[in-house]
Amino acid sequence: MFIGKRTLLLEFMEHTWRWFGPDDPISLSEIQQTGATGIVTALHHIPNGEAWSIDEIIKRKNLITDAGLSWSVVESVPVHEEIKKQIGNYKRYTENYKTSLRNLGYCGINVVCYNFMPVLDWSRTDLNFRMPDGSEALLFDINAFIAFDLFILKRRNAERDYSKEQINQATEYFKMLDDNKIKTLTRNILSGLPGSEESYSLESFNAVLNEYQSISNNKFKQNLFNFLNEIIPVAEASGVRMAIHPDDPPFSLLGLPRIVSTLEDTLELVGAINSPSNGITLCTGSFGAGHFNNCTEIAKALADRINFVHLRNVSNDADGNFHENPHLNGVVDMYAVIKEILLEEKRRHTNGLKNCNIPMRPDHGNKILDDFSRKTNPGYSLIGRMKGLAEIRGLELGILKSQEENR
């Protein structure tokens, strides 16, 4: 039987899919059927701070290649908390990080997404927010979060971070919660711990937060720049492009520092070390959750440092509330963002650069249809993400065809 191969224009983004490894309930075979060609994954079984060996990398790479896919992006090589705070064994963990980058480059895996968010990788208050059409999305409710902080977590001096009006609204919200709702809210917020790899009680979680009380935004930013000064030369020599993920959400929570939340933050970051290996993950959902951000402007201003793209959409407000939407609906102008990415790819191709086809993945997806019958990680539904990928690919093709016709 003849099986035709797809032919892609050079300007297309690389269509990838996040896979959480062999334990992911979505199989590589199913991923191939979505239309994705690349896999975004990590060695989640290796403890944070330990070096990734060539043997372990090759083992995972072969598993992906045997399924007819390619390992396109690492998401993530986690940055150990002691590196972020620059305490304890942070120098040893930094050396291990360098080893992982060298080994990944040796194995031909050239894009590494990472973040420098303290303690929590992301925060939502409702993982099953019912949309008008019956689908379910991820939601961040500022009143719910403040109620958790003040009355469930009982973080020391938390009230200093909020206005009187915010405290009053959170108090009223908390009054509506019974024991089951308190447990659910707590579980939802703690789901943002890195890969759910750590297990915290409220007491131990408070203790971890307290360790950041003496670390200002400026100090935390300097810690990041110190880390980049160590790893970017190694990444560049290894042919690896780093792609920092923005804060999710892009504003301070729990008194923790936030340093990758705005266009200004990100311009300062890439300017700190002038290297194509010092790049960003353009996450339209994370940037878009802040009403003060314009994702099209960010894509345009940072085009030559975009090494990876997460595409998703949100609705937000000025109070800090937001929920995730279908990929083409929301505050993010997906047409304009994708157009900027395709223009950057064309520029790279014209200049003979190696990284022409920027890897993209549909980030998150509402639960729809048969997604309700399968347990998956929050935001990582099968059908919802496949719908998003299909929408993005259709929009991308339309933009490219329009550009061709206008030449």
Image: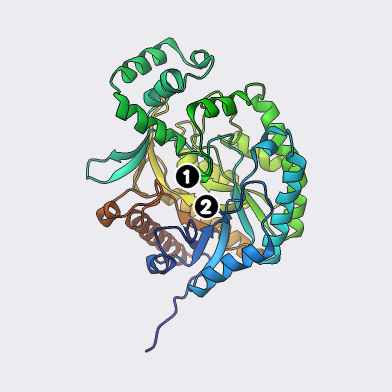
Left or right, residue 372 beside residue 252: left
Q: Can residue 13 be seen from the camera position used here?
A: no
Choose top left, top right, bottom left or bottom right for residue 169.
Answer: top left
What's the mark number on residue 56?
A: none
**The N terminus - image quarter:** bottom left
Considering only vertical position in the picture, is 160 above or below 20?
Answer: above
Q: Which residue is mark 2?
A: 309
Left or right, residue 382 beside residue 89: left
Are dots 2 and 1 in contact, CB under 8 Å? yes
Q: Amino acid at mark 2?
A: Val
Q: Which residue is mark 1?
A: 284
What is the C-alpha distance between the residues marked 2 and 1? 8 Å
Left or right, residue 378 beside residue 275: left
Q: Amino acid at mark 1?
A: Thr
Considering only vertical position in the picture, is 64 above or below 43?
Answer: below
> How many residues crowd around disc 1 within 10 Å: few (fewer than 14), some, or many (20 or more)?
many
